[in-house]
Image (cartoon, grey):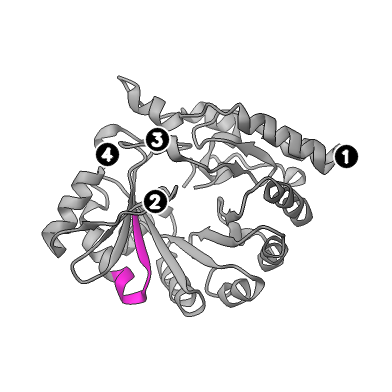
């Protein structure tokens, strides 16, 4: 969760669904074929299935996914699937109610679990994303794998990253991939690496019983070299890297009457000049502290993860 004193984006700056769909169509014309709706929490946008329907109907878009905290998912899963959403990922860092309360500042674990159950009823592919923090939830890896297996959902364990408002981050709190593998192998037996030639951030493994899981080790083993992703914030700032301090203001182009061709040119210019290797640069630092101090977060909401996506 963000710091206690949130800095929200002005409501008038938030893109309308039609603006998001228009930008998506421009990206699709340049070869983008996969869209993930994330946040913050995307289900806070009312009538989200309407946006999904618009995006799914754009020529060239072959996959529409969503990442959610799951709190509001139970009531919307069926409508989202009917609108054209293909896949759902639910963020879930613990199965323990007290830990959940400390991490999220809410008592919504039952609602999240209900959302997950609804997702597995309506979607063929459901994943669970778990950020693993040493001394906080690193003892829950086997339980989370078993939980996902029972529901037909694949769990992806993510190393704790120093992005956005991770103001309490430190390297000694990172539970790295080797430690994850050792923990899982003590419980389940040998993990078999799956050889997959994709640009996806997760390395996938198979347990002896056939259960698959993923590990995203972007803190200790960055995948900048193969990254083909970019982020569009809710108010139209296009970010080429999760660590990017600045981006391209596509909302300004939209609202000053720029043509699709002009927007396309701006995108191509920024993408071809891209040199972002944020995770690699952070890994190379000798003294690595939290990426953004609280004072800076409160001056610039675009640096917070509830704005740029989690």
| Helix, strand or loop under label 1 | loop
The answer to whether mark 1 and mark 4 are in CB contact below 8 A is: no
State the CA–CA distance, disc 4 to disc 3: 10 Å
Pointer 2: what residue? 197
Point out the frontmost of discs 3 and 1.
1
> Which numbered disc flags the more N-terminal residue, 4 or 3?
3
Measuring 34% from the left and 21% from the top, which residue is drawn there?
Answer: 285
In the displayed image of the protein, which residue is found farthest to the right?
Answer: 257
160 and 279: which one is in front? 279
Pointer 1: what residue? 257
State the CA–CA distance, disc 1 to disc 4: 47 Å
Q: Which residues are magenta?
A: 147-156
Tell me if residue 155 is in the magenta stretch: yes
> Which numbered disc flags the more N-terminal residue, 2 or 4?
4
- Tell me, yes or no, if residue 288 can be seen here: no
Residue 173 tag number: 4
Pointer 3: what residue? 162
């Amino acid at each position: 969760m963000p710091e206690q004193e949130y800095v929200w984006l002005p409501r008038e700056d938030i893109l309308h669904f039609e603006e998001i769909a228009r930008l998506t169509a421009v990206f699709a014309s340049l070869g983008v074929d996969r869209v993930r709706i994330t946040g913050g929490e995307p289900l806070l946008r009312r009538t989200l299935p309407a946006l999904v329907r618009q995006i799914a109907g754009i020529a060239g878009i072959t996959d529409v996914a969503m990442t959610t905290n799951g709190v509001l998912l139970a009531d919307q899963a069926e409508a989202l699937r009917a609108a054209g959403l293909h896949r759902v990922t639910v963020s879930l860092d613990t199965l323990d109610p007290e830990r959940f309360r400390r991490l999220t500042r809410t008592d919504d674990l039952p609602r999240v679990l209900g959302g997950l159950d609804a997702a597995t009823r309506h979607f063929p592919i459901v994943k669970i994303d778990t950020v693993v923090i040493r001394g906080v939830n690193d003892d829950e890896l086997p339980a989370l794998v078993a939980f996902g297996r029972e529901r037909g959902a694949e769990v992806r364990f993510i190393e704790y990253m120093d992005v956005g408002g991770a103001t309490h981050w430190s390297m000694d709190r990172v539970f790295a991939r080797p430690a994850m593998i050792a923990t899982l192998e003590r419980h389940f037996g040998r993990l078999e690496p799956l050889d997959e030639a994709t640009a996806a951030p997760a390395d996938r493994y198979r347990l002896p019983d056939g259960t698959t899981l993923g590990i995203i080790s972007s803190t200790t083993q960055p995948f900048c070299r193969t990254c083909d992703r970019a982020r569009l914030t809710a108010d139209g700032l296009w970010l080429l890297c999760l660590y990017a301090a600045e981006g391209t203001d596509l909302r300004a182009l939209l609202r000053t009457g720029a043509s699709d061709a002009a927007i396309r040119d701006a995108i191509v210019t920024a993408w071809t000049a891209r040199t972002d290797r944020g995770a690699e640069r952070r890994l190379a630092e000798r003294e690595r502290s939290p990426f953004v101090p609280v004072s800076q977060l409160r001056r610039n909401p675009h640096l917070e993860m509830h704005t740029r996506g989690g």
